[in-house]
Amino acid sequence: MSRKRFREAEALHQRVIAITEQARGPRHPDLVTALENYALFLRAVRRTYEAATLEQKAKAILAH
């Protein structure tokens, strides 16, 4: 993946999370899905610490 495409994909993931959180709220299952999808993307580009942080946030939402 080119750097430009990577930046575009990352920006889109972040935008989806922001819009979902605003539209659905901070504890909605759709937000969990968006966080998990972004975490998968981050793992694919070997940013595992950031991915783990998002996965923990998603688990915390599901726990409530």
Image (spheres, rainbow, N blue to C red):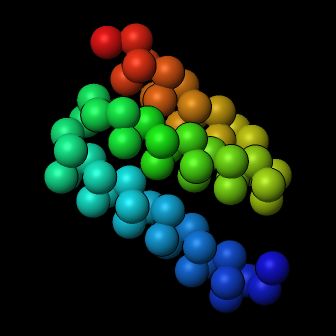
Q: Can residue 24 be seen in this view?
A: yes
Q: Where is residue 62 in the image (x, y as percent from the top left)?
A: 41, 19
Q: Position of residue 61 (x, y in %)?
A: 37, 23
Q: So how many labels did they put on this image? A: 0
| Residue name at image x 81 percent, y 79 percent | 1
Q: Is residue 37 above or below residue 5?
A: above
Q: Where is residue 10 in the image (x, y as percent from the top left)?
A: 57, 68
Q: Where is residue 23 in the image (x, y as percent from the top left)?
A: 18, 52
Between 41 and 52, the one lying in front of the other is: 41
Q: In screen coordinates, is 38 left or right of 61?
A: right
Q: Residue furthest top?
A: 63
| Residue name at image x 39 percent, y 61 percent | 16
Q: Is residue 50 visible?
A: no
Q: In screen coordinates, is 47 left or right of 10?
A: right
Q: In screen coordinates, is 64 left or right of 3?
A: left
Q: In this view, does 59 lie above or below 31?
A: above
| Residue name at image x 62 percent, y 45 percent | 39
Q: Is residue 58 above or below residue 41?
A: above
Q: In which quarter of the image is residue 56?
A: top right
| Residue name at image x 79 percent, y 55 percent | 44
Quadrant in which the C terminus is drawn: top left
